């Protein structure tokens, strides 16, 4: 079942069993996080997604936001352990793009990346930078 789910969003043929297990854990973590974030709102009534571009568009020009985003990522890489695994980055980007495509009306670039921390957390920075803690994977096991 997990193989079918994963093949729905990215090509998994030729991947090792270990890689597929890791992808399954990541998928479960992200789905559980999404469900725990959505289910309380479903009971409360209609869900309205925020417009992600409104607040930053009024505060910074696109050039200023790009400059802030680059500085933000330099600081993140200096202070935190960013996971540079291409397979994990590809998976997180594919899943993240699917999620934001239904929430964002304008064409916007997002950069998703993993942080090697045991906590269950995620954060967003300027210029579409979104960090996800690897603790999400561990919590789903």
Image: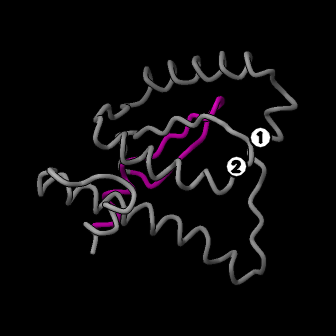
The residue depicted at 20 percent of the width and 60 percent of the height is 21
Q: Residues within 10 Å of mark 2 (few under 14, many from 20)?
A: some
The one nearer the camera, 71 or 12, is 12
Callout in the foreground (2, 1): 2
Identity of the residue furthest to the left in this view:
17
- Residue 131 in the magenta stretch? The answer is yes
Q: Residues within 10 Å of mark 1 (few under 14, many from 20)?
A: few
- Residue 34 in the magenta stretch? The answer is no
Q: Are marks 2 and 1 in contact (CB under 8 Å)?
A: yes
The one nearer the camera, 90 or 76, is 90
Residue 108 vs 47, above or below: the answer is: above
Where does label 2 land, which residue? 104
Residue 19: x %, y % from top left: 18, 52
Residue 120: x %, y % from top left: 44, 55
Image position of 41 (left or right of 129): right
The one nearer the camera, 55 or 2, is 2
Q: Residue 138 is drawn in which quadrant?
A: bottom left
Q: Residue 107 is drawn in which quadrant?
A: top right
Q: Which residues are magenta?
A: 119-141
Identity of the residue furthest to the right in this view:
58
Residue 39 vs 27, above or below: the answer is: below
Image position of 39 (left or right of 118): right
The residue depicted at 12 percent of the width and 57 percent of the height is 17
The span from disc 2 to disc 1 (Cα, nearest Å) is 8 Å
Where does label 1 land, which residue? 53
Residue 124: x %, y % from top left: 60, 40
Image position of 84 (left or right of 103): left
């Amino acid at each position: 079942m997990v193989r079918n789910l994963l093949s729905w969003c990215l090509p998994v043929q030729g991947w090792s069993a270990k890689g597929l297990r890791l992808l399954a854990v990541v998928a479960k973590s992200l789905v559980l996080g999404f469900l725990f974030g959505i289910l309380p709102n479903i009971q409360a009534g209609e869900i309205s997604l925020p417009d992600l571009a409104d607040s930053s568009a009024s505060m910074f020009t696109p050039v200023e936001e790009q400059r802030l985003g680059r500085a933000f990522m330099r600081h993140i890489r200096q202070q935190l352990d960013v996971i540079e695994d291409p397979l994990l980055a590809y998976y997180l980007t594919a899943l993240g793009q699917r999620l934001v495509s239904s929430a964002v009306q304008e064409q916007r670039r997002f950069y998703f990346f993993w942080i090697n921390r045991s906590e269950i957390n995620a954060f967003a920075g300027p210029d579409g930078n979104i960090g996800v803690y690897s603790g999400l994977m561990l919590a789903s096991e």
